[in-house]
Image (cartoon, rainbow, N blue to C red):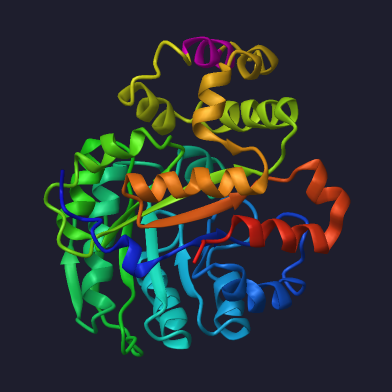
């Protein structure tokens, strides 16, 4: 195995995905300010159909000036290369040394159906954007025709004094190997503790200090029926996306998820969700009491994830308990000293 995770206990990274469901952006101010005392070092965003990736991080840079800020992920198709570089440079300027820029191919739904951009050559586009960002965020001029775009004489007017770390979202072998060779880290998603070893096996070329971030879906409730029903719906929505379906075939879940994919393709959403086995839900969605969930997330760290990014799933307890319950749950899920 590559020796890429030896420093994880020194770094002690522990992340939370923001914004939290049911909490307005302005109402995040006090919560973000409190996160370091609750056991969190990082906040991470995504970019699907809610907030964009950068606005919550810009607010967090002011409201909690010690938190590290990460995108997981910003799609490589939905902004032009120059605009993506400018946006990242601005956040890196506002939060020197605290930005981790995670980029990824995203999906045909997000890129094509929702943004009207052709989803073509995702591996090549990810590679080309990664190389473009590496050079332009360091203040270099980029004047090239790549396989997926042409940029003429672009140079940032305000390159950040400390360029952000560049992380590449990756699922299967080819993209993981690209991340190991050219990025500062990778971002994993929708995998079990046991799957971490499969991903890490593709990172043999990673340099020392290489970061392995993982978004981990956490449903902190002791109500097993609720957790599994929620997990089935989430899995049906995500793992029917072609890239994630291929990922889980690669991981060896082809037979377990065969009925899901067949029913989904036939338009039978109810049967598709109901077909997801309990053992798949339990492997991919962390659930139980907050304390049990915290220990489960720690297992990802023990397996080699350097930066767990908890994605909090709504529960009846959180909905009924309001702010006090949310803070108590976040404290219980936070890193242990």
At x 60%, y 13%, the residue is 275
Residue placed most toward the observer, 132 or 8: 8
At x 41%, y 45%, the residue is 300
Residue 302: say if magenta.
no
Q: For residue 107, what is the image quadrant?
A: top left
Residue placed most toward the observer, 262 or 209: 209
Q: Main secondary structure of the magenta part?
A: helix
Q: Is residue 312 left or right of residue 128?
A: right
Specify start and end residues of the magenta stretch as a single range.
258-265
As drawn, the residue found furthest toward the front would be 337
Q: Is residue 112 left or right of residue 311?
A: left
Give above or below for 329 relative to 267.
Answer: below
Residue placed most toward the observer, 210 or 324: 324
State the image coordinates of residue 158 (x, y, percent, origin top left): 36, 90
Count of numbered marks:
0
Residue 259: say if magenta.
yes
Q: For residue 17, what is the image quadrant?
A: bottom right
Give above or below for 281 relative to 34.
Answer: above
Residue placed most toward the observer, 306 or 57: 306
Q: For residue 155, what is the image quadrant?
A: bottom left
| Residue 117 visible in the current orientation | no
State the image coordinates of residue 334 (x, y, percent, origin top left): 57, 60
Q: Image quadrant for the N terminus?
A: top left
At x 20%, y 39%, the residue is 201
| Residue 218 visible in the current orientation | yes
As drawn, the residue found furthest toward the right would be 320
At x 19%, y 47%, the residue is 203
Give above or below for 62 relative to 203.
Answer: below
State the image coordinates of residue 210 (x, y, percent, origin top left): 24, 60
State the image coordinates of residue 217 (x, y, percent, origin top left): 56, 43
């Amino acid at each position: 195995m590559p020796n890429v995770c030896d420093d994880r206990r020194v770094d002690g990274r522990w992340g939370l995905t923001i914004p939290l469901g049911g909490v307005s952006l302005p109402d995040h101010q006090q919560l973000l300010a409190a996160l370091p005392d609750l056991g969190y070092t990082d906040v991470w965003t995504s970019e699907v159909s809610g907030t964009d990736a950068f606005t919550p991080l810009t607010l967090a840079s002011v409201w909690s000036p010690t938190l590290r800020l990460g995108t997981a992920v910003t799609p490589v198709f939905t902004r032009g290369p120059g605009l993506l570089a400018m946006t990242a440079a601005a956040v890196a300027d506002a939060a020197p040394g605290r930005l981790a820029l995670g980029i990824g191919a995203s999906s045909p739904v997000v890129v094509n159906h929702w943004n009207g951009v052709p989803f073509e050559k995702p591996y090549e586009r990810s590679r080309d954007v990664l190389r473009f960002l590496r050079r332009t965020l360091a203040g270099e001029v980029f004047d090239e025709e790549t396989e997926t775009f042409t940029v003429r004489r672009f140079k940032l007017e305000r390159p950040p004094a400390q360029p952000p770390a560049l992380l590449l979202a990756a699922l299967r072998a080819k993209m993981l190997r690209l991340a190991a060779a050219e990025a500062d880290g990778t971002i994993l998603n929708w995998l079990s503790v046991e799957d971490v070893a499969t991903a890490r096996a593709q990172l043999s070329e990673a340099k020392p200090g290489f970061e392995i971030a993982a978004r981990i879906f956490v449903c902190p409730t002791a109500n097993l029926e609720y957790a599994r029903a929620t997990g089935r719906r989430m899995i049906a929505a995500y793992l029917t996306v072609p890239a994630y379906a291929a990922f889980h075939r690669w991981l060896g879940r082809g037979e377990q998820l065969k009925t899901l994919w067949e029913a989904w393709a036939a338009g039978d959403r109810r049967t598709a969700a109901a077909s997801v086995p309990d053992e798949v839900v339990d492997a991919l969605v962390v659930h139980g009491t907050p304390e049990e969930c915290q220990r489960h997330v720690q297992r990802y760290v023990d397996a080699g994830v350097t930066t767990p990014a908890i994605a909090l799933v709504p529960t009846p307890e959180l909905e009924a308990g309001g702010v006090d319950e949310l803070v108590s749950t976040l404290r219980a899920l936070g890193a242990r000293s």
